[in-house]
Image (cartoon, rainbow, N blue to C red):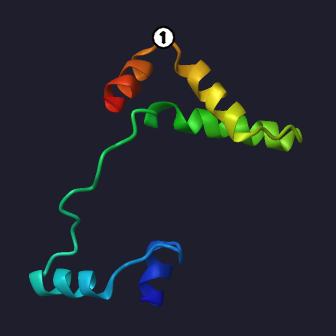
Amino acid sequence: MNTARAKYDIPKQAEISVETIRTWAKRGSCNVAHPGLTSPMEEVEDYIVEIMTQLAEMQVPITCHQGLELANSLILETSTAKKVMTGKK
């Protein structure tokens, strides 16, 4: 397990059940059947992280609330905002 974690850069806090691995091995498949949903914010996430990183480098950290306000202001009246609202329903 530790070798695979290092090889695939899996964080230690990520729990992977031994039973899950055995089941995948029995099937001969290690592909995830359903990768999950993608975030409607995916197209702006890198930009938000870049802004936050620059603020931190300037020693102007922001709170979680300010981060949410920043993200919301960036997507205001855009197609991304519509996707976020559709995903909430």
Rendering quarter of residue 54: top right
Between 67 and 59, the one nearer to me in the picture: 67
Amino acid carrying label 1: it is Glu
In the displayed orientation, state which residue is furthest to the front: 89
Return the x and y of residue 82 as percentages of the image width and height.
Answer: 38, 19
Return the x and y of residue 26 as percentages of the image width and height.
Answer: 12, 87
**SS at badge 1:** loop
Residue depicted at x 33% and y 31%: 87
Between 84 and 2, the one nearer to me in the picture: 84
Mark 1 closeness class: few <14, some 14–19, many ≥20 residues within 10 Å = few
Return the x and y of residue 32 as percentages of the image width and height.
Answer: 23, 65
Residue depicted at x 53% and y 37%: 45
Residue depicted at x 62% and y 34%: 48
Locate residue 74 relative to residue 87 in the image: left or right.
right
In the displayed orientation, state which residue is furthest to the top: 77
Residue depicted at x 10% and y 81%: 27
In which quadrant of the rendered image does the N terminus lie? bottom left
Establish if 14 lies above or below 25.
Answer: above
Residue hosting label 1: 77
In the displayed orientation, state which residue is furthest to the left: 27
Return the x and y of residue 79 as percentages of the image width and height.
Answer: 39, 17
Rendering quarter of residue 58: top right
